Amino acid sequence: MSTQQQEPEPQEPESQEAPEDPEMRGAESPQDRRLKEKEQGLAQEETVDESDLEGETVHIKVFRYDPEIEGKQEPRFDDFYVPFEKGMTVLDAVMYARDEFDSSLTFRHSCRQAVCGSDAFFVNGRQRLGCKTQIADLEQPVRVEPLPHQEVVKDLVVDMDHFYDQMHAVEPYFQQADLPEGDLEEQRQSRENREKVKMSTRCIWCAACMSSCNIAAGDNEYLGPAAINKAYRFAMDEREDEEIKEHRLRIVEQEHGVWRCQTQFSCTEVCPKDIPLTEHIQELKREAVKKNLKFW
Amino acid sequence: MYEHDVIVVGAGGAGLRAAVAAHEAGADTALVSKLHPVRSHTGAAEGGINAALQEGDDWELHAYDTMKGSDYLADAPAVETLARDAPDDTITLEHWGMPFSREEDGRVSQRPFGGLSYPRTTYAGAETGHHLLHTMYEQVVKRGIQVYDEWYVMNLVTDDAPDPNDRECHGVVAYDVQSGKVEGFRANRGVILATGGPGQAFDHTTNAVSCTGDGHAMAYRAGAPLEDMEFIQFHPTSLPSTGVLISEGVRGEGGILYNNEGERFMFEYGYANNSGELASRDVVARAELTEVGEGRGVEDEYVHLDMRHLGEDRILDRLENILHLAEDFEGVDGLVEPMPVKPGQHYAMGGIDVDENGQTCIDGLYAAGECACVSVHGGNRLGGNALPELIVFGKRAGRHAAGEDLGEAEIETGYGDDVEDETDTELPVAPGEAGLDTSGGVAADGGVAAEAEGLLERAVERERARVDRLMDKDDGIQHAQIRSKLQNAMTDYVNVFRTEEGIKKALKIIRECREEYQNVYVDDPSRTFNTDLQMTYETRNLIDVAETIALGALVRNEFRGAHWRQENQERDDENWLKHTLISWDDGEPTIFYRPVILEGEEKTYEPKERSY
C-alpha cells in the first residue's frame, strides 16, 4: 500500500462540506431513523404479506458474466423463477437457482447467518447481505447484481483484493508495548470503553460500505469506511497507549484518509451490522484536529 | 510448486492459532484456505471460552466437568491439557486485544454454561467466535504470515507405504479458486489440517455451507483413522427454518424452555431436576424432541425459548446478537415473544485421530480443532469447550509441527498395540468399495528429497487429470442431487434418536450416493471461480464422512452421551469404554477399537451416573 507512506496533508475541516457532528444534527442518527422506519413498517420497499406468496414462484434477475466463456463475456441478466417458501432469503433463492437450474451460477456464501460477510450483493439497487434479506420484503423481479465499484470476477463474485489491501493499510491489529506483569493478568478495560468500541468491532468485512461510497468509487486510494472503522476500533480502545493512538491518527488523517469523507452516510445506511460508520469517521476527524492543534 | 516449512489447511480458529504458534516457533508458515480467513465458521460461534480464571475455580474442576460431560468417553490426558492450558491461552487472546465483555473492575466477564460446576465461560457478547476469529486473523496479519486465500485443498500428498504408521505426509495439492490453477504445496516439516466440522453431512445444521469435512475425508483416505464419528452433537436451540444457532448463553443467562402448554418441561417432566435448561446439550435436545413426539411441541415441530423476563438491558448487554438472529431469520422479536427452537446438528465430537500434540499416525500430518479428535469431548461436548480446544490444541499442533519439543504424547494414535480388533456387527451393505477413485498415497521412489518432489508432482498430475475428467464429461449426475439425498438420509435416520433399522437405511442410501457419484460431472465449463467443481469435490468428502458417522452409530450398540440407541437405552461401561476407530484400508473401511484413558496425571475419573 502506497497510501500509508504518503505525507499527511491535513486539511481544515471547514474546507469540507459541513462535516456534521451527529450531536449537532439533532438527536436522530440515520440508524435511529432506519430502526424507527422498520418499527413502523415503513421500510423503503413494499413489504408483501408472506401468505400472498405461498405457492407462488419468485422472479429473480441475476447478473451473469464470465470472462472465459464465450456466451457470458457480454454481461447479461438471467431470469429464474424460484418456488417461494416462508422465510426465503435472497441467498436461498440464488442457491435454489444454482442447484436446480444452472450449476454454473456463481456467488460467495458460507455461514448464511450474517457473520461471514461473504454474500454481500447489490439487490434491487442497494448493498445487502443475501442471507439476511427476506424475499418477501422486496419488489419483484428481484435484481441481484455484484457489488458496484468492484471488479467482477464472475457472476456475483467481485475481486476483494483492493478491499483487503485497504483494511491491511491501517495496521489492523492490537498494539500495546507493555502488558501487565504475570501471564494470567489481563489488561483492564472499563465497561464504558468496551461499549464505545463495541459497534466498531462488529465489522464482518463484507465490503457493502465500500461499495456504496461515492468517494471510494472516485478515489481508489481512499481508505474507505471499513478500514477507517477498523482504525477507530483500535484508536478508541483504551488498552492501547497514547503514542500508538497518535500513530493510528496519522495513518487515517493522510491525504486519502478521513478528510475524504463527505458525510454522505451511504456506508452507515447499508451496513448490515448497523455500525455507525460515518460517526466513527467524524470522530476520528475531531481527534485528528485535536492532536494537530497540539502540534501547532 | 510452493514450499513452506509448515502448511496449515483451513484458517478458522484452530488454523490461525496453529499458524501463529508455528511462526513464533520459527517456522516458515503458510495458511491455505478455501475461504478468506475472516469468512471461517469460527466466526459463528456465539457462546464463549471455558477457562478456570477466577479464584474459587480451578483447572481440575474444569477437567472433572469435562470428563463427566463427555459421559466418560474422553481421554483424561487430553482433557487435563485442555483445562490446564485454557486460562493462559484465553488471556493471550485478551493480550492480543480481543474485546471480551467486562466486569465493573475491568476484568473479563465469565458466565454459567450447561454442565459446568462454576461460571467459567469467558465471552464477548453473544459473538465470541467472531471476535476470536478476527483477533487471531489480526495477529496473522501483524506477523506477515503467508495466506493463500480461496485456494481449495484437494488432497494430501503421502507415500503409499503399506502400514499407515510408516507413511509420511509431504504436502498438499490445491487449486486456486479464482483461476482454476492446480498446484502442489510442499511442507518440509508438516501439514496441519484445521478444516472444521462436517455439519453439511446433515440437512438441518447450524454449520456453514463450507463445513464439508474436507480434512476428515482427506486424512481418512490417506490412512489416518477417524475416531468416535458416531458422536454428533445436536444443539438444543437452533432456529427451525434455517438451523441458525441460538447461543446456549441464552439459557446460561436464565432463558427458559416451554412446551406448547406453557410448561417448563425440563423440570415438569423430570428431564433434569437440578439443572433444568442448563443440563448438558444431549439431555436438553432429547427432552425437546420427546416433548414434540408426545404432542406437546409447537406446530408439532419445535419448542419455545423465552428470554423476555431477563429484561431489555441484560439482553442488549449480553445477548444482543440473538435478538438480531431471531428477527432476521425467524421474524420474531425476542424482547416481546418467545423464540422457536429445535435441535440441529451442531458439532462433531469425533474426528481425525490425534494425540495431544495434534499428531496423526502419519508422520508430518497433524489435525486440530473440530476436524480432530484428541479426544476432549468424548460422547458429548460441553458448551464453551470448543473455542478453548481451538486455541489450546491449535497452538500445540503449530508448535510441534514447527519442531518444538512438547514431550512424549500419552495418547496413542493409529492401529497400535493397544487396539481391539474389528467389529462383528452385520452391515447392511458392503461399505465403501464402489470403485470411487479416492486413494491417498502415491508410489514412492528415489531418495528422500527427490522422493518428496516426485510424489508431489505425481499427485498434482493426478488431480489435474481428475479435474479434466470431471469437466470433460458432458452428462451424468450433478453433485447437488447427491448432496441433498445424503443430507436428508442423515437427518432422517442418524439424528438425535437412532434405531438400528434407520441407521441401516442410511447406510444403504449412502452407498447409493457413492455409486451415483461414479457418474458425477461438472456442468460449468469455466476455470474461473468454478464453485460447481469445488462442491463436487466437497460432496465426495461428505460421502466418506457420512459413512463413517453411520458406521460408528451402527456398531456402538449402547447409549452414551449424544449417541442414543432405541434398542440399547443404557450406557454399557463394561463393553464400551472404548473409542470407535474407522480406517480406510484397501479401499474400504475397517473398524477397530481403543480403550478410553480415564487415568489422569493425579487422579482417575471413575465413571458415574450422569445426572443434571
Image: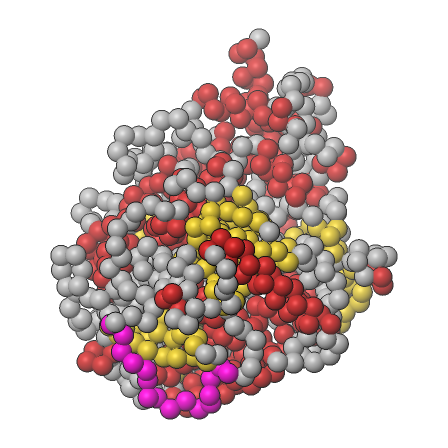
Residue B107, image quadrant: top left
The percent coordinates of residue B139 (x first, y second) are: 46, 39
The percent coordinates of residue A191 (x first, y second) are: 38, 37
Q: Main secondary structure of the magenta part?
A: loop
Viewer-closest of B514 and B110:
B514
The residue depicted at 18 percent of the width and 47 percent of the height is B56
Residue B115 highlighted magenta (yes or no):
no
Q: Quadrant of the C terminus of chain B?
A: bottom left
Asked whether residue B278 is in view, the answer is no
Residue B425 highlighted magenta (yes or no):
yes
The residue depicted at 74 percent of the width and 32 percent of the height is A219
What coloring was used for the rendering? secondary structure
The residue depicted at 69 percent of the width and 78 percent of the height is A55
Residue A290's place in the image compared with B267, above or below, is above
Residue B254, image quadrant: bottom left
Viewer-closest of B230 and B583:
B583
The residue depicted at 50 percent of the width and 29 percent of the height is A235
The percent coordinates of residue B368 (x first, y second) are: 40, 57
Q: Does B137 sit left or right of B528 as displayed?
A: left
The percent coordinates of residue A47 (x first, y second) are: 69, 61
User: Which span of residues is magenta-colored?
Assistant: B418-433
In the displayed orientation, state which residue is furthest to the top.
Answer: A296
Total marks in image = 0
Residue B532's place in the image compared with A9, above or below, is below
Viewer-closest of B229 and B22:
B22
Residue A158's place in the image compared with A1, above or below, is below
Residue B269, image quadrant: bottom left
Q: Does A78 sit left or right of B126 as displayed?
A: right
Asked whether residue A217 is in view, the answer is yes
